[in-house]
Amino acid sequence: MSEISTRDAARDSTRDNRDSALSVAALSSERRESDENVWTRRLVLFLRVMALLSILKGLYHWAQVTGFVGGEDDAFENQSMAWQAATVYFAVIELVAAVGLWLATPWGAVVWLTTVVSMAVIELMFPGIYGGSLIVVAVEALMLAAYLALAWMAARERPP
């Protein structure tokens, strides 16, 4: 009986050593994995910041629709049909994009890219709607370039 208990004790000791070695290996691989995903984390952070900006832009457009912003001359009803359509479009799509961006889903990025390109096109090709500000176009292009750079770097750190 002592031989069996000695064997069981040796087996338990070996199992404990193996378990501690596995937990150390798990910790070190977890640390290495987080270092490898630095660009992915930066991309997700960027998407979350863009989500917050999209919420603000969407709420601003809804404030224009409901009349919380501007005076009587700037009322939604007094604007052109093109301005009204563009404002309602951005009021809806910005908030949808914000949800998708916050969740870091592929469809969120696609909807957000649609809003960025739409705003740039409206500013450049239809200056009568929102005034044709080149600053807005430059900011939209800068955000688009930042997203593309971060997405490219995040894709490079994943194995093929």
Image (cartoon, helix red, strand yellow):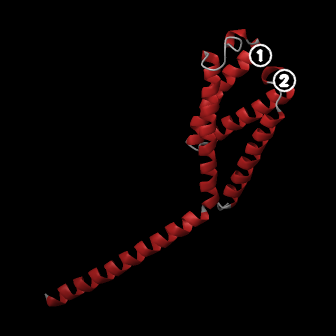
Q: Position of residue 26 (x, y in %)?
A: 46, 70
- Is disc 2 surrounded by few (<14), some (14 to 19) or many (20+) residues within 10 Å? few
Viewer-proximal residue among 61 and 113: 61
- Quadrant position of the C terminus in the picture: bottom right
Q: How many marks?
A: 2
* Amino acid beneath label 1: Ala
Q: Which residue is mark 1?
A: 82
Q: Secondary structure at mark 2?
A: loop
Q: Is residue 18 left or right of residue 133?
A: left
The disc, 1 or 2, on the residue closer to the chain's N-terminal end is 1
Q: Which residue is mark 2?
A: 126
Q: Residue furthest right?
A: 125
Q: Secondary structure at mark 1?
A: helix
- Quadrant position of the N terminus in the picture: bottom left
Q: Is residue 30 left or right of residue 111?
A: left
Q: Position of residue 32 (x, y in %)?
A: 55, 69
Query: Is residue 130 shown above or below 99?
Result: above
Q: Are marks 1 and 2 in contact (CB under 8 Å)?
A: yes
